[in-house]
């Protein structure tokens, strides 16, 4: 039986830390679905479709091996998507104890909802300080975000006048 993992997130925008977790998930599971989800608790910078495009470009450029599919989910619960595609597990990247505190309640609620397990993966510590929100802030104030994001994202953000 094929083991399908879902790597969900806002990916606003995708960072090198996200890419690292996606690669690790693809090394462990047969199929990885990277799902761009609307987070009602956050004000988005990029439209969902743009985030999907940047993820697709970044994954292609990084030549990640394995079966990796990128999609978005904006209606209903994330676990509904998991049930629809027969996913066995959710994968989340953990950079620090703050992430553990943020992710643990969601992991338990998702398991309560449909019985799905969440696996926490540790990205390369070189990316431990990288977050989409910092990238958004630095980019919007005219700083260089190229050390933190895939080339496709850095190039795209350079083209946006009003971030
Ligand atoms: O990258 P983020 O913003 O930390 O990702 C959080 C996300 C989008 C994965 C989370 O907010 C989520 O799963 N949202 C979908 C709505 C849902 O299913 N909520 C219940 C989760 S317990």
Image (cartoon, rainbow, N blue to C red):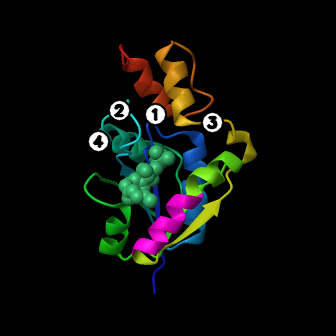
Q: Counting other residues with Cα less than 10 Å from the Cα at mark 1, is it few (<14), some (14-19), or many (20 or more)?
A: some
Callout 3: SS: loop
For the C terminus, give its image quadrant. top left
Q: Tell which of 10 and 1 is nearer to you.
A: 10
Magenta span has 115?
A: no
Callout 2: SS: loop
Label 4 vs 1, first from the N-terminus: 4
Q: Tell which of 68 and 15 is nearer to you.
A: 15
In the current view of this chain or complex, which residue is farthest to the right? 125
Label 4 with label 1: CB-CB less than 8 Å: no
Give the vertical position of 41 relative to 151 (above or below).
below
Counting from the top left corner in percent of width and height, residue 24 is at: 61, 60
Label 1 vs 2, first from the N-terminus: 2
Q: Quadrant of residue 57?
A: top left
Mark 4 to mark 1 CA distance (whole Å) = 15 Å
**What residue did someone put label 1 on?**
152
In the current view of this chain or complex, which residue is farthest to the left? 75
**What residue did someone put label 2 on?**
46
Q: Counting other residues with Cα less than 10 Å from the Cα at mark 4, is it few (<14), some (14-19), or many (20 or more)?
A: few
**What residue did someone put label 4 on?**
49
Label 3 vs 4, first from the N-terminus: 4
Q: Quadrant of residue 92?
A: bottom right
Counting from the top left corner in percent of width and height, residue 140 is at: 47, 17
Q: Tell which of 144 and 11 is nearer to you.
A: 11
**What residue did someone put label 3 on?**
130
Q: Which residues are magenta?
A: 104-113
Label 1 vs 3, first from the N-terminus: 3
Label 3 vs 2, first from the N-terminus: 2
């Amino acid at each position: 039986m094929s083991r399908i993992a879902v790597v969900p997130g806002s990916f606003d925008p995708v960072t090198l830390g996200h890419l690292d977790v996606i690669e690790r998930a693809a090394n462990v599971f047969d199929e990885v679905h990277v799902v761009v989800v609307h987070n009602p608790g956050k004000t988005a910078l990029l439209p969902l479709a743009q985030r999907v495009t940047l993820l697709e470009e970044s994954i292609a450029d990084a030549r990640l091996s394995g079966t990796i599919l990128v999609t978005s989910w904006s209606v209903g619960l994330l676990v509904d998507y998991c049930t629809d595609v027969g996913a066995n597990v959710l994968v989340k990247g953990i950079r620090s104890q703050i992430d553990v505190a943020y992710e643990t309640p969601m992991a338990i609620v998702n398991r309560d909802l449909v019985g799905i397990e969440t696996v926490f993966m540790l990205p390369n510590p070189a990316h431990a300080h990288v977050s989409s929100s910092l990238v958004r802030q630095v980019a919007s104030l005219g700083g260089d975000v190229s050390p933190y994001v895939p080339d496709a994202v850095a190039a795209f953000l350079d083209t946006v006048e009003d971030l």
